[in-house]
Amino acid sequence: MSIRPDAITGNAAAEQVFLGFLDSPADDEPIAQYHWLHEHAPVFMTTTGMVVLTRYDDVDLALRHRALGRGDESVQHLTDLPPQLVEPVMALWKRTMVFANPPLHTRMRRPVAAAFTPRHVEELRARIVTRIERLLDELTGGSEVDWVRAFASPLGTGVVGDMLGVPEPDRPELARLSPESMKVFDPMTASTDLPAAAEAVIDMADYFGDLVDDRRRDPGPDVVSRLAGALDDGSLERIEVVAASANLLNAGSDTLVNLLSNAMYALLTNPGQLDALRDLPPALLPRAVEELARWDPPLNLNPRTALEPCTIAGVDLTPGQIVIGVQGAANRDPSHYTDPDRLDLARDEGPSLSFGGGVHYCLGAHLGRLVLGEVLRVLGATGTTVAAAGTARRRPGHNLRGFQYLPVTLTR
């Protein structure tokens, strides 16, 4: 999309650009819109009173500011759903730490965070590498495969399924339900698609409710068993354990899949980057992981609600006012990154905002970085060559960023 800065001016212009890229086809990259907003309206207010932020420092501040938290900003679009669908979804949402504020958030996050410490995640490395190597062995041979369906999805679901203790036969159905359920929290989801998304949320809650009950009777070494144990000491309620389990599964079956798919697409569409990856010293691999996460984050918009009067980016906010941090734009902020539209696997300019920030910083960030890093390392160590094999297709929308289809060939 070509945008002439002199064609439209003012907040109405900024709103038009912002809504334009949200409504554009999923395969349209929003880089031109990011450029326009950075130059002409890095902070603006929509006609409905929402404040939109695109600069790195402003988005970072909004994510960390204690006067901003979670309200109804992520579920306002659900009001047209019938009661039998919206009520169970809202009941689950209100007891989900992703959408809770302290002190409730603090109480719910503590037992979940214990399973995601760097030490616990590091203990999974050997199993993760085994899964990566097995999948690559199965796919290498020159035939066209879908990187999303054949590699990223089984890897993500397998890694998190192992952590949670989800039986292997149940994982394909959960992998189908997870991206469908995530549409509930995307305000750009078409109203006609919301009922199916809400039903997927309910189905996942029912599944994990049964699994929690099973693990409570017969606990194992998995995360769901550990969370189920928190019911006995009173630190968590049953619906909170169910919600936490479903969210963690979503992290593997949706967010991690998007991270792996976006990263591969970035490598394939930036000439020379796969060769550069093979030549990258092992000590610099974490930089490549961070750069790929910056380049195309799995979550583009990160909204907050003002819980009390405050000032963000020079804008005085009143309680209930919504602030939207555009993480994808913040990751391309020319005042924070040198030549931000260039993919540089050795870039060393600090962490991106792809995993959020503040009290709602992504619990799975360390796991996501570890998995992506091991995928890159194993590709190089095994001499696996990945090549584009057709036209990739994005998943609908510009909030949850990922691919429905990413055809590749793998050879050695």
Image (tube, rainbow, N blue to C red):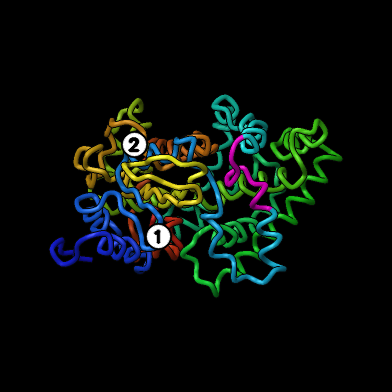
Residue sitting at the far bottom: 192
**Residue 77: horizontal and vertical position, in percent?**
53, 65
Q: Is residue 357 magenta?
A: no
Above-or-below relation of 293 to 196: above
The residue that appears at 36% across and 52% down in the rendered structure is 52
Q: Amino acid at mark 2?
A: Ala
**Residue hosting label 2:** 288
Q: How far, Cα to Cα, is label 2 from label 1? A: 24 Å
The residue that appears at 76% across and 41% down in the rendered structure is 237
Q: Is residue 92 left or right of residue 231?
A: left
Label 1, residues with CA under 10 Å away: few <14, some 14-19, many ≥20: many
**Residue 1: horizontal and vertical position, in percent?**
23, 66
Q: Which span is picked out in magenta?
A: 92-102
Q: Is residue 141 left or right of residue 181?
A: left
Label 2, residues with CA under 10 Å away: few <14, some 14-19, many ≥20: many
The residue closer to the viewer here, 247 or 322, is: 322
Q: Between tags 2 and 1, which lies in front?
A: 1
The residue that appears at 40% across and 57% down in the rendered structure is 49
The residue that appears at 38% across and 43% down in the rendered structure is 293
Q: Is residue 250 left or right of residue 282?
A: right
Q: Secondary structure at mark 2?
A: helix
**Residue hosting label 1:** 398
Q: Amino acid at mark 1?
A: His
Whether residue 154 appears in this view of the structure is: no
The residue closer to the viewer here, 357 or 129, is: 357
